[in-house]
Structures are given as structure tokens and as C-alpha cells.
Amino acid sequence: MPTESQIAVHFDTMDASVDLINSIVDGTYRYLYQIDSTEAKRIVTANTDHLEWQASTDWYQDSTNDKTAYDNAVTAGKAYVA
């Protein structure tokens, strides 16, 4: 089981994935003009996969953190690549 500090880092990286997914989905990603739709979908898929993998861990399941943003990002990301 990771330490509290390590868990905090995991949640920080998950927050970054949420921000990236949401910014690509809503069109505000500042580098969106530099990538095509295939690359955007690849990035979103990689980040939704990351969130789902983290969500499958014991430390995530045991956490009392609000997980709404993670769930919503996964849902939005999967809809975006569909």
C-alpha cells in the first residue's frame, strides 16, 4: 500500500489527466491547434485509461476523496473518442 504522500501524488496526476481530458473535449486545450483529431483522441484515450487503472487500485477504492471529477472525465473522454 502506498504512503499518504504517494497517494497524494497519484491524485495530483489524476487531476492533471482530468484537466487534459476536459480541455481537449471542450476545445480549450492550448495546443489543440498543433494536433490532429487522431492525436487528440489518442491523448484522451491514454488519459482515460490512466484514470480507470488508478480507479481499480485498493488505495483509490479506500480513499474518501470525491471521485466525481474522475468519473465525469472518463465518461466525457469515452464519449469524445466514440
Image (cartoon, rainbow, N blue to C red):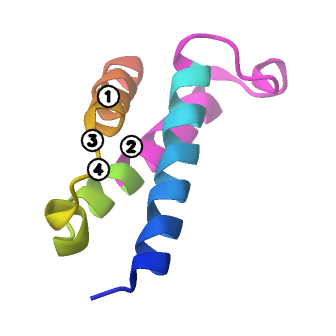
Residue 16 x/y as whole percent: 58, 46
Magenta part mainly helix, strand or loop? helix
Q: Which residue position is annotated with label 4?
A: 65
Q: Is mark 1 on a helix, strand or loop?
A: helix
Region rendered in magenta = 25-49
Q: Distance between the residues labelled 2 and 1?
A: 7 Å
Asked if the residue under mark 4 is in contact with the one under mark 3, i.e. CB atoms within 8 Å, the reply is yes
Disc 3/disc 4 C-alpha distance (Å): 6 Å
Q: Is residue 34 left or right of residue 56?
A: right
Visible residue check, residue 42: no
Q: What element carries label 3?
A: loop
Graded by Cα atoms within 10 Å as few (under 14), some (14 to 19) or many (20 or more), the crowding at tag 3 reads few
Relative to 37, is 25 on the left or the right?
A: left
Seen in the picture, residue 70 relative to 10 is either above or below; the reply is: above
Question: How far apart in space, not on screen, are marks 1 and 4 (Cα)?
Answer: 23 Å
**Which circle marks residue 78 in the picture?**
1
Instruction: Please identify the quarter of the rendering in which residue 27 is found.
Output: top right
Residue highlighted by disc 2 = 48
What amino acid type is highlighted by mark number 1? Lys
Residue hosting label 3: 67
Task: Mark yes or no: residue 68 visible.
Answer: yes
Residue 62: x and y in percent read 15, 66
